[in-house]
Amino acid sequence: MKTGFDSPKLEYQVILEWIEPYSSVLDLGCGDGELLSILIQERKAHAQGIEIDEQAIRKCVARGLSVFQEDIDIGLSEYTDKSFDYVILSQSLQQVRRPDFVLKEALRVGKKTIVSFPNFVHYSSRFQIFFGGKVPVTPALPYEWYDTPNLHFLSISDFVEFCRKRDIKIENSAYIGKNGRVRMLPNLFAEIGVFLLSG
């Protein structure tokens, strides 16, 4: 469930900074397992993934990863409360049918939850809508309207407000643009938001 954003490495670097060595990690919508592999190599994490796409699962298996085929929209009922140190939703939350429920389940199962998503109101998207009159296609949003996996379109400000209304604590955040981390006006200039949450 990953996007086609050209430089996920900076996003992964942020996630690596937040995850303690030897932690237990569950990656929801793990895609081809690239992040899982990095966590195992760099943080010696005890990591497993959940993915619904069969082709992505085959790539995970080829990497030697522990991945289960499940639909995270149904929930994580087989996992007990706080059974992982971290639950990750990297570029997955905007692609599920029930993001509120999925995030609630992630916060239940993980002691901490890391969420990243493309910022749909990045200035380049705004320009394309305003001047071009078309749904934007950008490096962080590389899909045409008719083949996008994204079901929900949110901004960094939307997500911060969402967390505030639900008493979800944002413990840390990072904002990523084309040329590195964004320090000012992230809702305008960041292409990706990354958040460390606790329930």
Image (cartoon, helix red, strand yellow):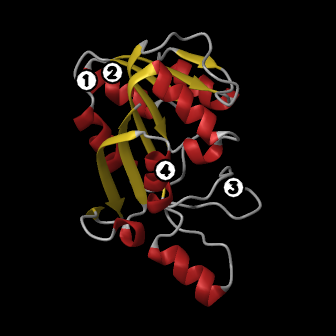
Q: Which amino acid does label 2 sit on?
A: Ile
Instruction: Residue under label 1, please give it.
Output: 43
How far apart are labels 2 and 1 at the CA level? 6 Å
- Does 69 appear above or below 28? above
Helix, strand or loop at mark 3: loop
The answer to which of 96 and 12 lies nearer the viewer is 96
Q: Do the residues labelled 1 and 4 touch (CB within 8 Å)?
A: no
- Does 76 appear above or below 106? above
Task: Indicate which disc, 4 or 2, sits on the residue closer to the N terminus.
Answer: 2
Instruction: Residue under label 4, please give it.
Output: 117
Helix, strand or loop at mark 4: strand
Instruction: Residue under label 3, please give it.
Output: 148
Q: Comparing marks 4 and 2, which lies closer to the viewer?
A: 4
Task: Indicate which disc, 1 or 4, sits on the residue closer to the N terminus.
Answer: 1
Task: Indicate which disc, 3 or 2, sits on the residue closer to the N terminus.
Answer: 2
- Residue at horizontal 56%, vertical 61%? 141
- Residue at horizontal 54%, vertical 11%? 79
Q: In which quarter of the image is the N terminus?
A: top right
Q: Position of residue 120 (x, y in %)?
A: 54, 64
Q: Are marks 2 and 1 in contact (CB under 8 Å)?
A: yes
Asked if residue 44 lies left or right of residue 121, the reply is left
Q: What residue type is labelled 4?
A: Phe
The label on residue 40 is 2
Q: In which quarter of the image is the C terminus?
A: top left
